[in-house]
Amino acid sequence: MKNFFCTFSALLALLLFYSSAFAQGFFCPNTPRAIAAGDFNGDNKLDVALVRQGSQSVFIYPGDGQGGLGAPNAGSPSPPQLSSVAAADFVPGGNFEVAAAITTPTLVGTLSALAVGHFDGDGKLDVAVADTDPASGAGRVRVFLQNSFPNFALSFIDPSVLWGPADIAVGDFNGNGKPDVAVAKRLNSAFRAAPGEIAIFLGNGAGGFTRQPDIHSGGSGPQSIVAGDFNGDGKFDLAVLHFNSTDISILLGEGNGNFAVSPDSPIPLPVGIEVPPFLPRGASLLALDFNSDGRLDLAAATHGGHNSNNRVFVLLGDGEGGFTTSLEFDPGFPPRSIVAGDFNGDGLPDIAASFFCGTEVKILLNPLPLPGKAMVYVSVIKEDKVAVIDPETDTVIENIAVDEKPDGITILPSGTKVYVVNERKHPPGKGGIITVIKTSIPPGTHTILTAIPIGKKPRGIAATPVMVDPGDGDGARFFVYVAEKGKRSVGVIDSNTDALISRVPLDENGFSSHKKKGKHEDDDDDDDDEDDDKDHDHDVSRPPGREPIDIAFSPDGRFAYVLAKAASALVVLDTTKAVTDPMNAVLNRLRLGRSPEVVAADPLGQFVYVGHHGDGELLILDASGAPALTEVAVLDVGRKPKGIAIQSDGSPIYVSNHESDDVTVISRNGSTHTILDPSVPVERKPLGIGILPEGTKVYVANERSGTVSVIETAGDSVTGAISVGDGPRRIAVGRVPN
């Protein structure tokens, strides 16, 4: 194990641990204080990091992936009084590290809060800390920038008085693309509960901040604060939990650094919070989508000291700034800090809580059902249709007639629309279209909404995994990207209007085209599907965007990864500039090996996978420093890999191999990828592949057999084949709303 302790002052430090291992530590009986969640041991299962009041160690509880935690291990001793903790991938590579803030006791307790963000834009995670100066009793905000891990340097300290800092949140509050900081002020200068004030610090993108006039929090005694877009307008809002008025207020952001209290605020909580305001605690408010409906929800922990008012609440958001209490947990002990994560692998976030007494850490499993109904959509190229499969019965329940030659297919994360690529041969050379289908659960009720003209020879298509706000004034929404093979470009569709709103040229964007005539140069050639099976040797003379055929996104929606087959290149796009400044949207270009065919991005944001058609290989790229990409490993999979599907927790990875008629299963442990033998045999010419949101089944389109194979992930075995028609190509899987 490697330990690093970096002293920034005599009173505050960051304790950073490499997550590869943690030495066994001594047991400290002090009261649990704050917790964080992350995969600290590289087994693809969420663990919990905990600090105790007055302790000198960070304790790691390993998760078992089924909602349970093992006995804790601890890091090496450090200076006393760890108070706040955060987990993040400080060292790019897939594993999580721990940052813990250290403070010295004062008249008002060991008050501190810690948040992580990219404060200077260099791609390295930095840390902001709100704590109390023991000499004056006044609060302060300090920002530490990461140089090269584990070295951090102080870049900013608030020169003004900030009484009683309780919690800190990070977001882009003025819409300039640079992270800002909001601090909940729990006390006033008399060490009494504040009437409710939030300090706003606007970042300059270089590690510096300017304090704005304080704003009212909408209640009394702010205890915890979180940032997020709660009303769907693409602007950061704030949610504030108050211990004195026992409620939550929503502060709606105006996009310029100003906020207004929501008309629906405050939101009263069913039980009181009877804790002295100076009692230090960890975060007690979270913002996350707990029911997977695409809207941010809230979780709040309240306690009443030694009485019975000990609760954890989940309040479901309506997407317009309103919230309704949906779940109420009675953990049996006074909760002190909560953190969210999928601890049992069911696709929904659970809650881990630390307590003042009794059990140190408890996992509260999310009982909410996944919304809507899972559906599988299969493009059938030779019958000009999309087959709809019900995973409950594994039967085709509907066939939707679309335009000519349907191939690529994607579904919005909201499950409301399916987009289908139609290359169209008639009239030749006039470009393809994208068929837009409105989804519906009852059989026979899907409807065609529109057809969007697109460039020549469209191939791959993908929807952003989250709503993206490109800063064009229309707020956040989903976008659909189309690889226009014949135009060497990527078309961008606005899912709100279903219109093509921009086109990113891949041969320009600062790269020379190096045009030379050859058999691949004439865009008007009438090639057929067999062209996709041709091997293209690596040739740096080819334009960097030659033949874009597939697209994947980083899970935060910031980057699009476009695979250019003939150029043997992976092009990284900025999804904001792809809308507002497409000529400058290309951020990076990575030359690849022979005939790349398919690209997929890890749902955790740590890796990008590229299947090489000619070599039968899977290239694994470290994407934690995106847009920079670094080769990690190359695995020999089956012949001509054509499809990739990944479980929501990053492992296993399923690769369909077109020539060997099988699916390779790859297990991931940290950054180590291992092929599991034997491969899973399927029917003839497997191509597209998809996995259910709950991760229980994998569906594989067998192009020559006219079937879709069903693989049960519990044993990685085929349980059946569904007849869908002549020439199934690609698969899209999602949950359709009721």
Image: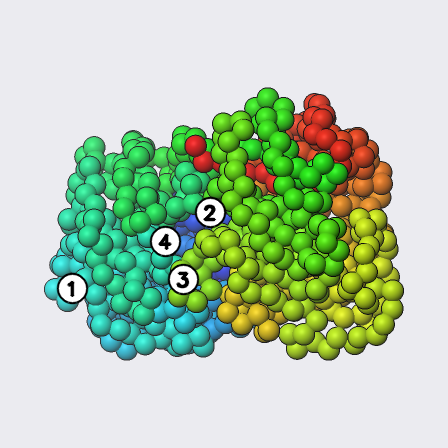
Quadrant holding the N terminus: bottom right
**Is mark 4 in CB contact (under 8 Å) with mark 2?**
no
- Mark 3–mark 4 Cα distance, whole angstroms, equals 11 Å
Q: Which residue is denoted by mark 4 in the rendering? A: 232
Report the mark closest to the observer, 3 or 4: 3
Give the CA distance from mark 3 to mark 2.
34 Å
Q: Residue at x 46, y 33 (%)?
A: 372
Q: Is mark 1 on a helix, strand or loop?
A: loop
What kind of residue is marked 3? Asp
Image spot of residue 199 (x, y percent): 26, 67
Compare residues 15 and 80 and report the one nearer the observer.
Answer: 15
Please, is residue 103 above or below residue 142 in the view?
above
Instruction: Kindly check if marks 3 and 2 are in contact, taking CB atoms under 8 A apart as contact.
Output: no
Q: Nearer the viewer, mark 3 or mark 1?
A: 3
The color scheme shown is rainbow
Q: Name the residue under label 3.
A: 474
* Mark before the other along the chain sequence, 3 or 4: 4
Task: Determine whether 517 is above or below 295 in the image.
Answer: below
Q: In the image, what residue type sits under mark 4?
A: Gly
Q: Which of marks 2 and 1 is nearer the N terminus?
A: 2
Residue 581 pos. (x, y %): 54, 72
Q: In which quarter of the image is residue 727?
A: top right
Q: Which amino acid does label 1 sit on?
A: Asn
Front residue of this view, candidates 645 and 715: 645
Comes first in the chain, label 3 or label 2: 2
| 3 or 1: tag closer to the N-terminus | 1
Q: Residue at x 21, y 45 (%)?
A: 267
The image position of residue 178, as x and y in percent, is 43, 70
Residue assigned mark 1: 188
Considering only order in the chain, which callout, 2 or 4, is on the residue closer to the N terminus? 2
Res. 606 visible in picture = no
Q: In which quarter of the image is residue 270?
A: top left
